[in-house]
Image (spheres, rainbow, N blue to C red):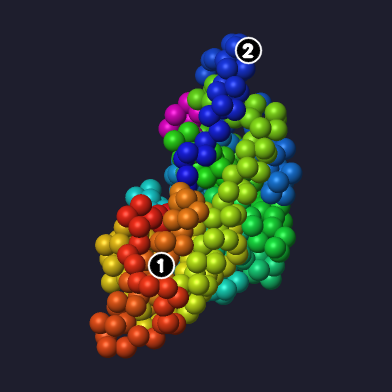
Amino acid sequence: MNVTNFPRIEWLACYRTVLAAAGRDELDYPPVAGLPALCDALAGYLGRVRGVRGSAETVMVTAGFAQGLSLLCEALPKLGIRKLAIEDPGHNGQRRFIEECGMHSVPVRVDREGVDVAHLAATGARAVLVTPAHQYPTGVTMSAQRRRALIRWAQDVDGLIIEDDYDGEFWFDRRSRPSALQGMAPDQVVYAGTASKTLVPGLRLGWLVIPPHLAAMLSRIRSRHDLGSDGITQCAFAELITSGMLDRHLRRVRSRYRSRREAFTQAVELHLPQARVTGSSAGLHAYLQLPPDINESALVEAALARSVLVHGGSRYQFAPGERPPALVVGYSTLPLAGISESMYAIRDAVDEQRAARGRSLSAPPTRSRAKGRADARICAV
Ligand SMILES: Cc1ncc(COP(=O)(O)O)c(C=O)c1O
């Protein structure tokens, strides 16, 4: 994520406005689930942009999704749930986090339609953490059929779906953007959003929209951890939403990220035509499936030696090596020109790897060989 896109001027204007007007309610301890002004603003905003169904009373403002997930990991055992199914491949940091929170994480296969619901049902888990809009890291969007099957599964097992909508605001695909899964089943789905990609991770600002029957329990759990999120930050964020500044900021950065995504796709077509960008065009990263003969870990190392930082797909898998070699590439921080340079450097590393094996299967070079520019860095997400 590119922190230089943070709308400092707008944030400062909102902060000034709310600080000048702040009275006792804003300066005193906030309600543990969030100030009504922000919960209201979020309920309206999420309904409008993501099709989330919920009132202010079902919103909880958190310190990012991380806190939301930790609260949920504490709530699940109270519902008799000790296993949390997670996507494989998925976010390896979240997997560790869930285990450290005392839950048992169970991997569930992801295919071209999203999480495999038959596999999920076979695990015996009654809760699952999914990224339906833009699967992390493969970029797959969950199909309509899978969405229905997943909700049916949750109803059948009296379970819970946690929907991590971490980059739902950045959609560049020509197909229409999928609404949040939560809108189909607000009693079965906890919707989780974050300002980490839309603004910056440093704000530590996230939110849950909780099934109404769980709202009181989550507030009780939360009140044992802290006494709510910083009130002035909540007011400033509410102001950013209601003033329309957040929408304008998102329009601006969406167009920047879209052009980087396009430049990345073009660079792949030009330099690595045998590789395939999977999933929907959305978010701040791409999953690049490599030809099967490529040694993924050697390529990651060779790319780094050319100043290009990417992660191998196996880093995101429970059992590394079960999927074709891949790279996970973050393109949001690169200048446009650097994207092609970086892909060229990766192609150079691929050619070197193949030449070392005594054969070169890649398309003939399109220009003379050159090392990637030292400042050309694709960043891993
Ligand atoms: C899959 C996924 N979920 C959620 C988050 C956000 O977590 P947090 O809100 O705690 O910063 C990230 C990172 O930005 C992520 O990659």
Please indicate, yes or no, whether residue 38 appears anywhere in the rendered image. Answer: no
* Mark 2 within 8 Å of ligand 1, using the beta carbon: no
Instruction: State the residue lying farthest toward the bottom.
Output: 359
- Regarding mark 2 in the picture, which secondary structure is present there? helix
- Left or right: where does residue 113 sit relative to residue 316? right
Q: Position of residue 109 (x, y in %)?
A: 49, 72
Q: Position of residue 48 (x, y in %)?
A: 74, 44
The answer to which image quadrant residue 379 occupies is bottom left
Res 293 label: none
From this view, report whether residue 134 is shown above or below residue 288: above
Q: Amino acid at mark 2?
A: Ala
Q: Position of residue 72 (x, y in %)?
A: 49, 46
Which mark sits nearer the N-terminus, 1 or 2? 2
From this view, report whether residue 212 is shown above or below residue 341: above
Q: Amino acid at mark 1?
A: Tyr
Name the residue rendered at 47%, 55% in the picture.
337
Marks 1 and 2 sit apart, C-alpha to C-alpha, by 53 Å
Q: Closer to the observer: label 1 or label 2?
A: 1
Res 21 label: 2
Residue count near mark 2 (Cα–Cα under 10 Å), binned few <14, some 14–19, many ≥20: few
Residue count near mark 1 (Cα–Cα under 10 Å), binned few <14, some 14–19, many ≥20: many
Tell me the residue that label 1 is attached to.
344
Highlighted range, magenta: 222-229
Instruction: State the residue lying farthest toward the front.
Output: 368
From this view, report whether residue 300 is shown above or below residue 249: below
Q: Are marks 1 and 2 in contact (CB under 8 Å)?
A: no
